[in-house]
Image (tube, helix red, strand yellow):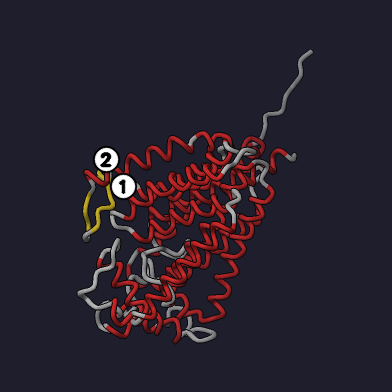
Amino acid sequence: MSVAFDKPSLWQRLRPVFQGFDLPLVAAIVFLSALALINMYSVGADHGTRFFQHARNILLALGVMFVVAQVPPQRIMSLALPLYVVGVVLLLGVEFFGVTKKGATRWLNVGVVIQPSEIMKIAMPLMLAWWFQRREGQLRPLDFGVAAGILALPAALILKQPDLGTTLLVVLAGLYVIFFAGLSWRLIVPVVAVGALGLSLIVAFEADICQPEVNWPGLHTYQKNRVCTLLDPMSDPLGKGFHIIQSMIAIGSGGVTGKGFMQGTQTHLEFIPERTTDFAFAGYAEEHGLIGVLVLMVGFLWLIFRGLLIAWQAPTLFTRLLAGAMALNFFSYAFVNMGMVSGILPVVGVPLPFVSYGGTAMVTLGLGMGVLMSIARSRGLMQR
């Protein structure tokens, strides 16, 4: 007696690959990608094919997210130590054999030119989450000291390149993990207080310490200039302060409703610098106004809070720490970029997720989204 088996359809074969994806997270990503493409079409209208290149980069990021989402969190955890070690070795390679462009040594030629500091944006939270997972149930103050050392080594190498923006993002990614692991407020408050005191002193004595002949210990001249330009951009309106002044004019001129799609004068008359990359938000605010900015912020908050919910529901310490750090990484990118473009933070070259053009940044973004999706997907599949 023979038994006939129906051949599974294409959807039946592919269904396990798509099963368990977090639909609210996907919806947030699609929403932000749509806003980003609309803005890139407008602000990049004078840049030929940049719109299509940006669409390609977004698709690349989504592809990376899809691939990483298939990897179980346990396998991701096994990659933490090797990825961190490779990242540190490559950063040391930059120190001795790096490629210098525009006064900064941030790249390494390994057949293709790469920027190893980008690896640490993912490797750092991975490594620290792995470390705290191993110490679960027996955490001591010394363990937080070791975590600080794990964070400090690559951060110091990146800062020396110099790359203040990437250093800030790597440090914040690491600090999020350390905070979620249970760092005491008694250690956090003194650091914040010292930082606030230092900032107050800089503001109080800005007229004296921003003189050209005054050097700031531990900072390069361009970093000092960025802080001083933040405090008083009109001190050099046609030089160091020009970019931020034009950006602030564009944002302010957008008003409540904006000037309209492709109608931004500051943008299309090329007063805004890097209007498709770091300063893309200024062009968006000019054309879409306060209402458009609030819509964009809702998209980011949607993504961030969904990521935090995934972290809250994650089954292990490693996945909770990693998902929480990845979610707040999006906050770091958005807050720092919007802050520097609006003139409330120094210009540090941090892109706005989805909105700013850039291939490497989009791949890193895809990795972060993929890790979040993997954690959400693994939990969803376990519940079925």
Disc 2: which residue: 110
Residue plotted at (45% across, 85% down)? 252
Residue 138: tell me if it is visible. Answer: yes
Image quadrant assignment for residue 199: bottom left
Disc 1: which residue: 114
Image quadrant assignment for residue 304: bottom right
Amino acid carrying label 2: it is Val
Q: Is residue 76 above or below residue 362?
A: above
Residue 76 point in image, percent of width and height = 53, 38
Residue 267: tell me if it is visible. Answer: no
Residue 355 point in image, percent of width and height = 46, 65
Do the numbered discs 1 and 2 sit on residues whose CB atoms are within 8 Å?
yes
Report helix, strand or loop for mark 1: strand
Residue plotted at (57% across, 80% down)? 291
Residue plotted at (65% across, 56% down)? 24
Residue 185 point in image, percent of width and height = 59, 58
For the residue pair 302 and 340, the one nearer the viewer reads as 340
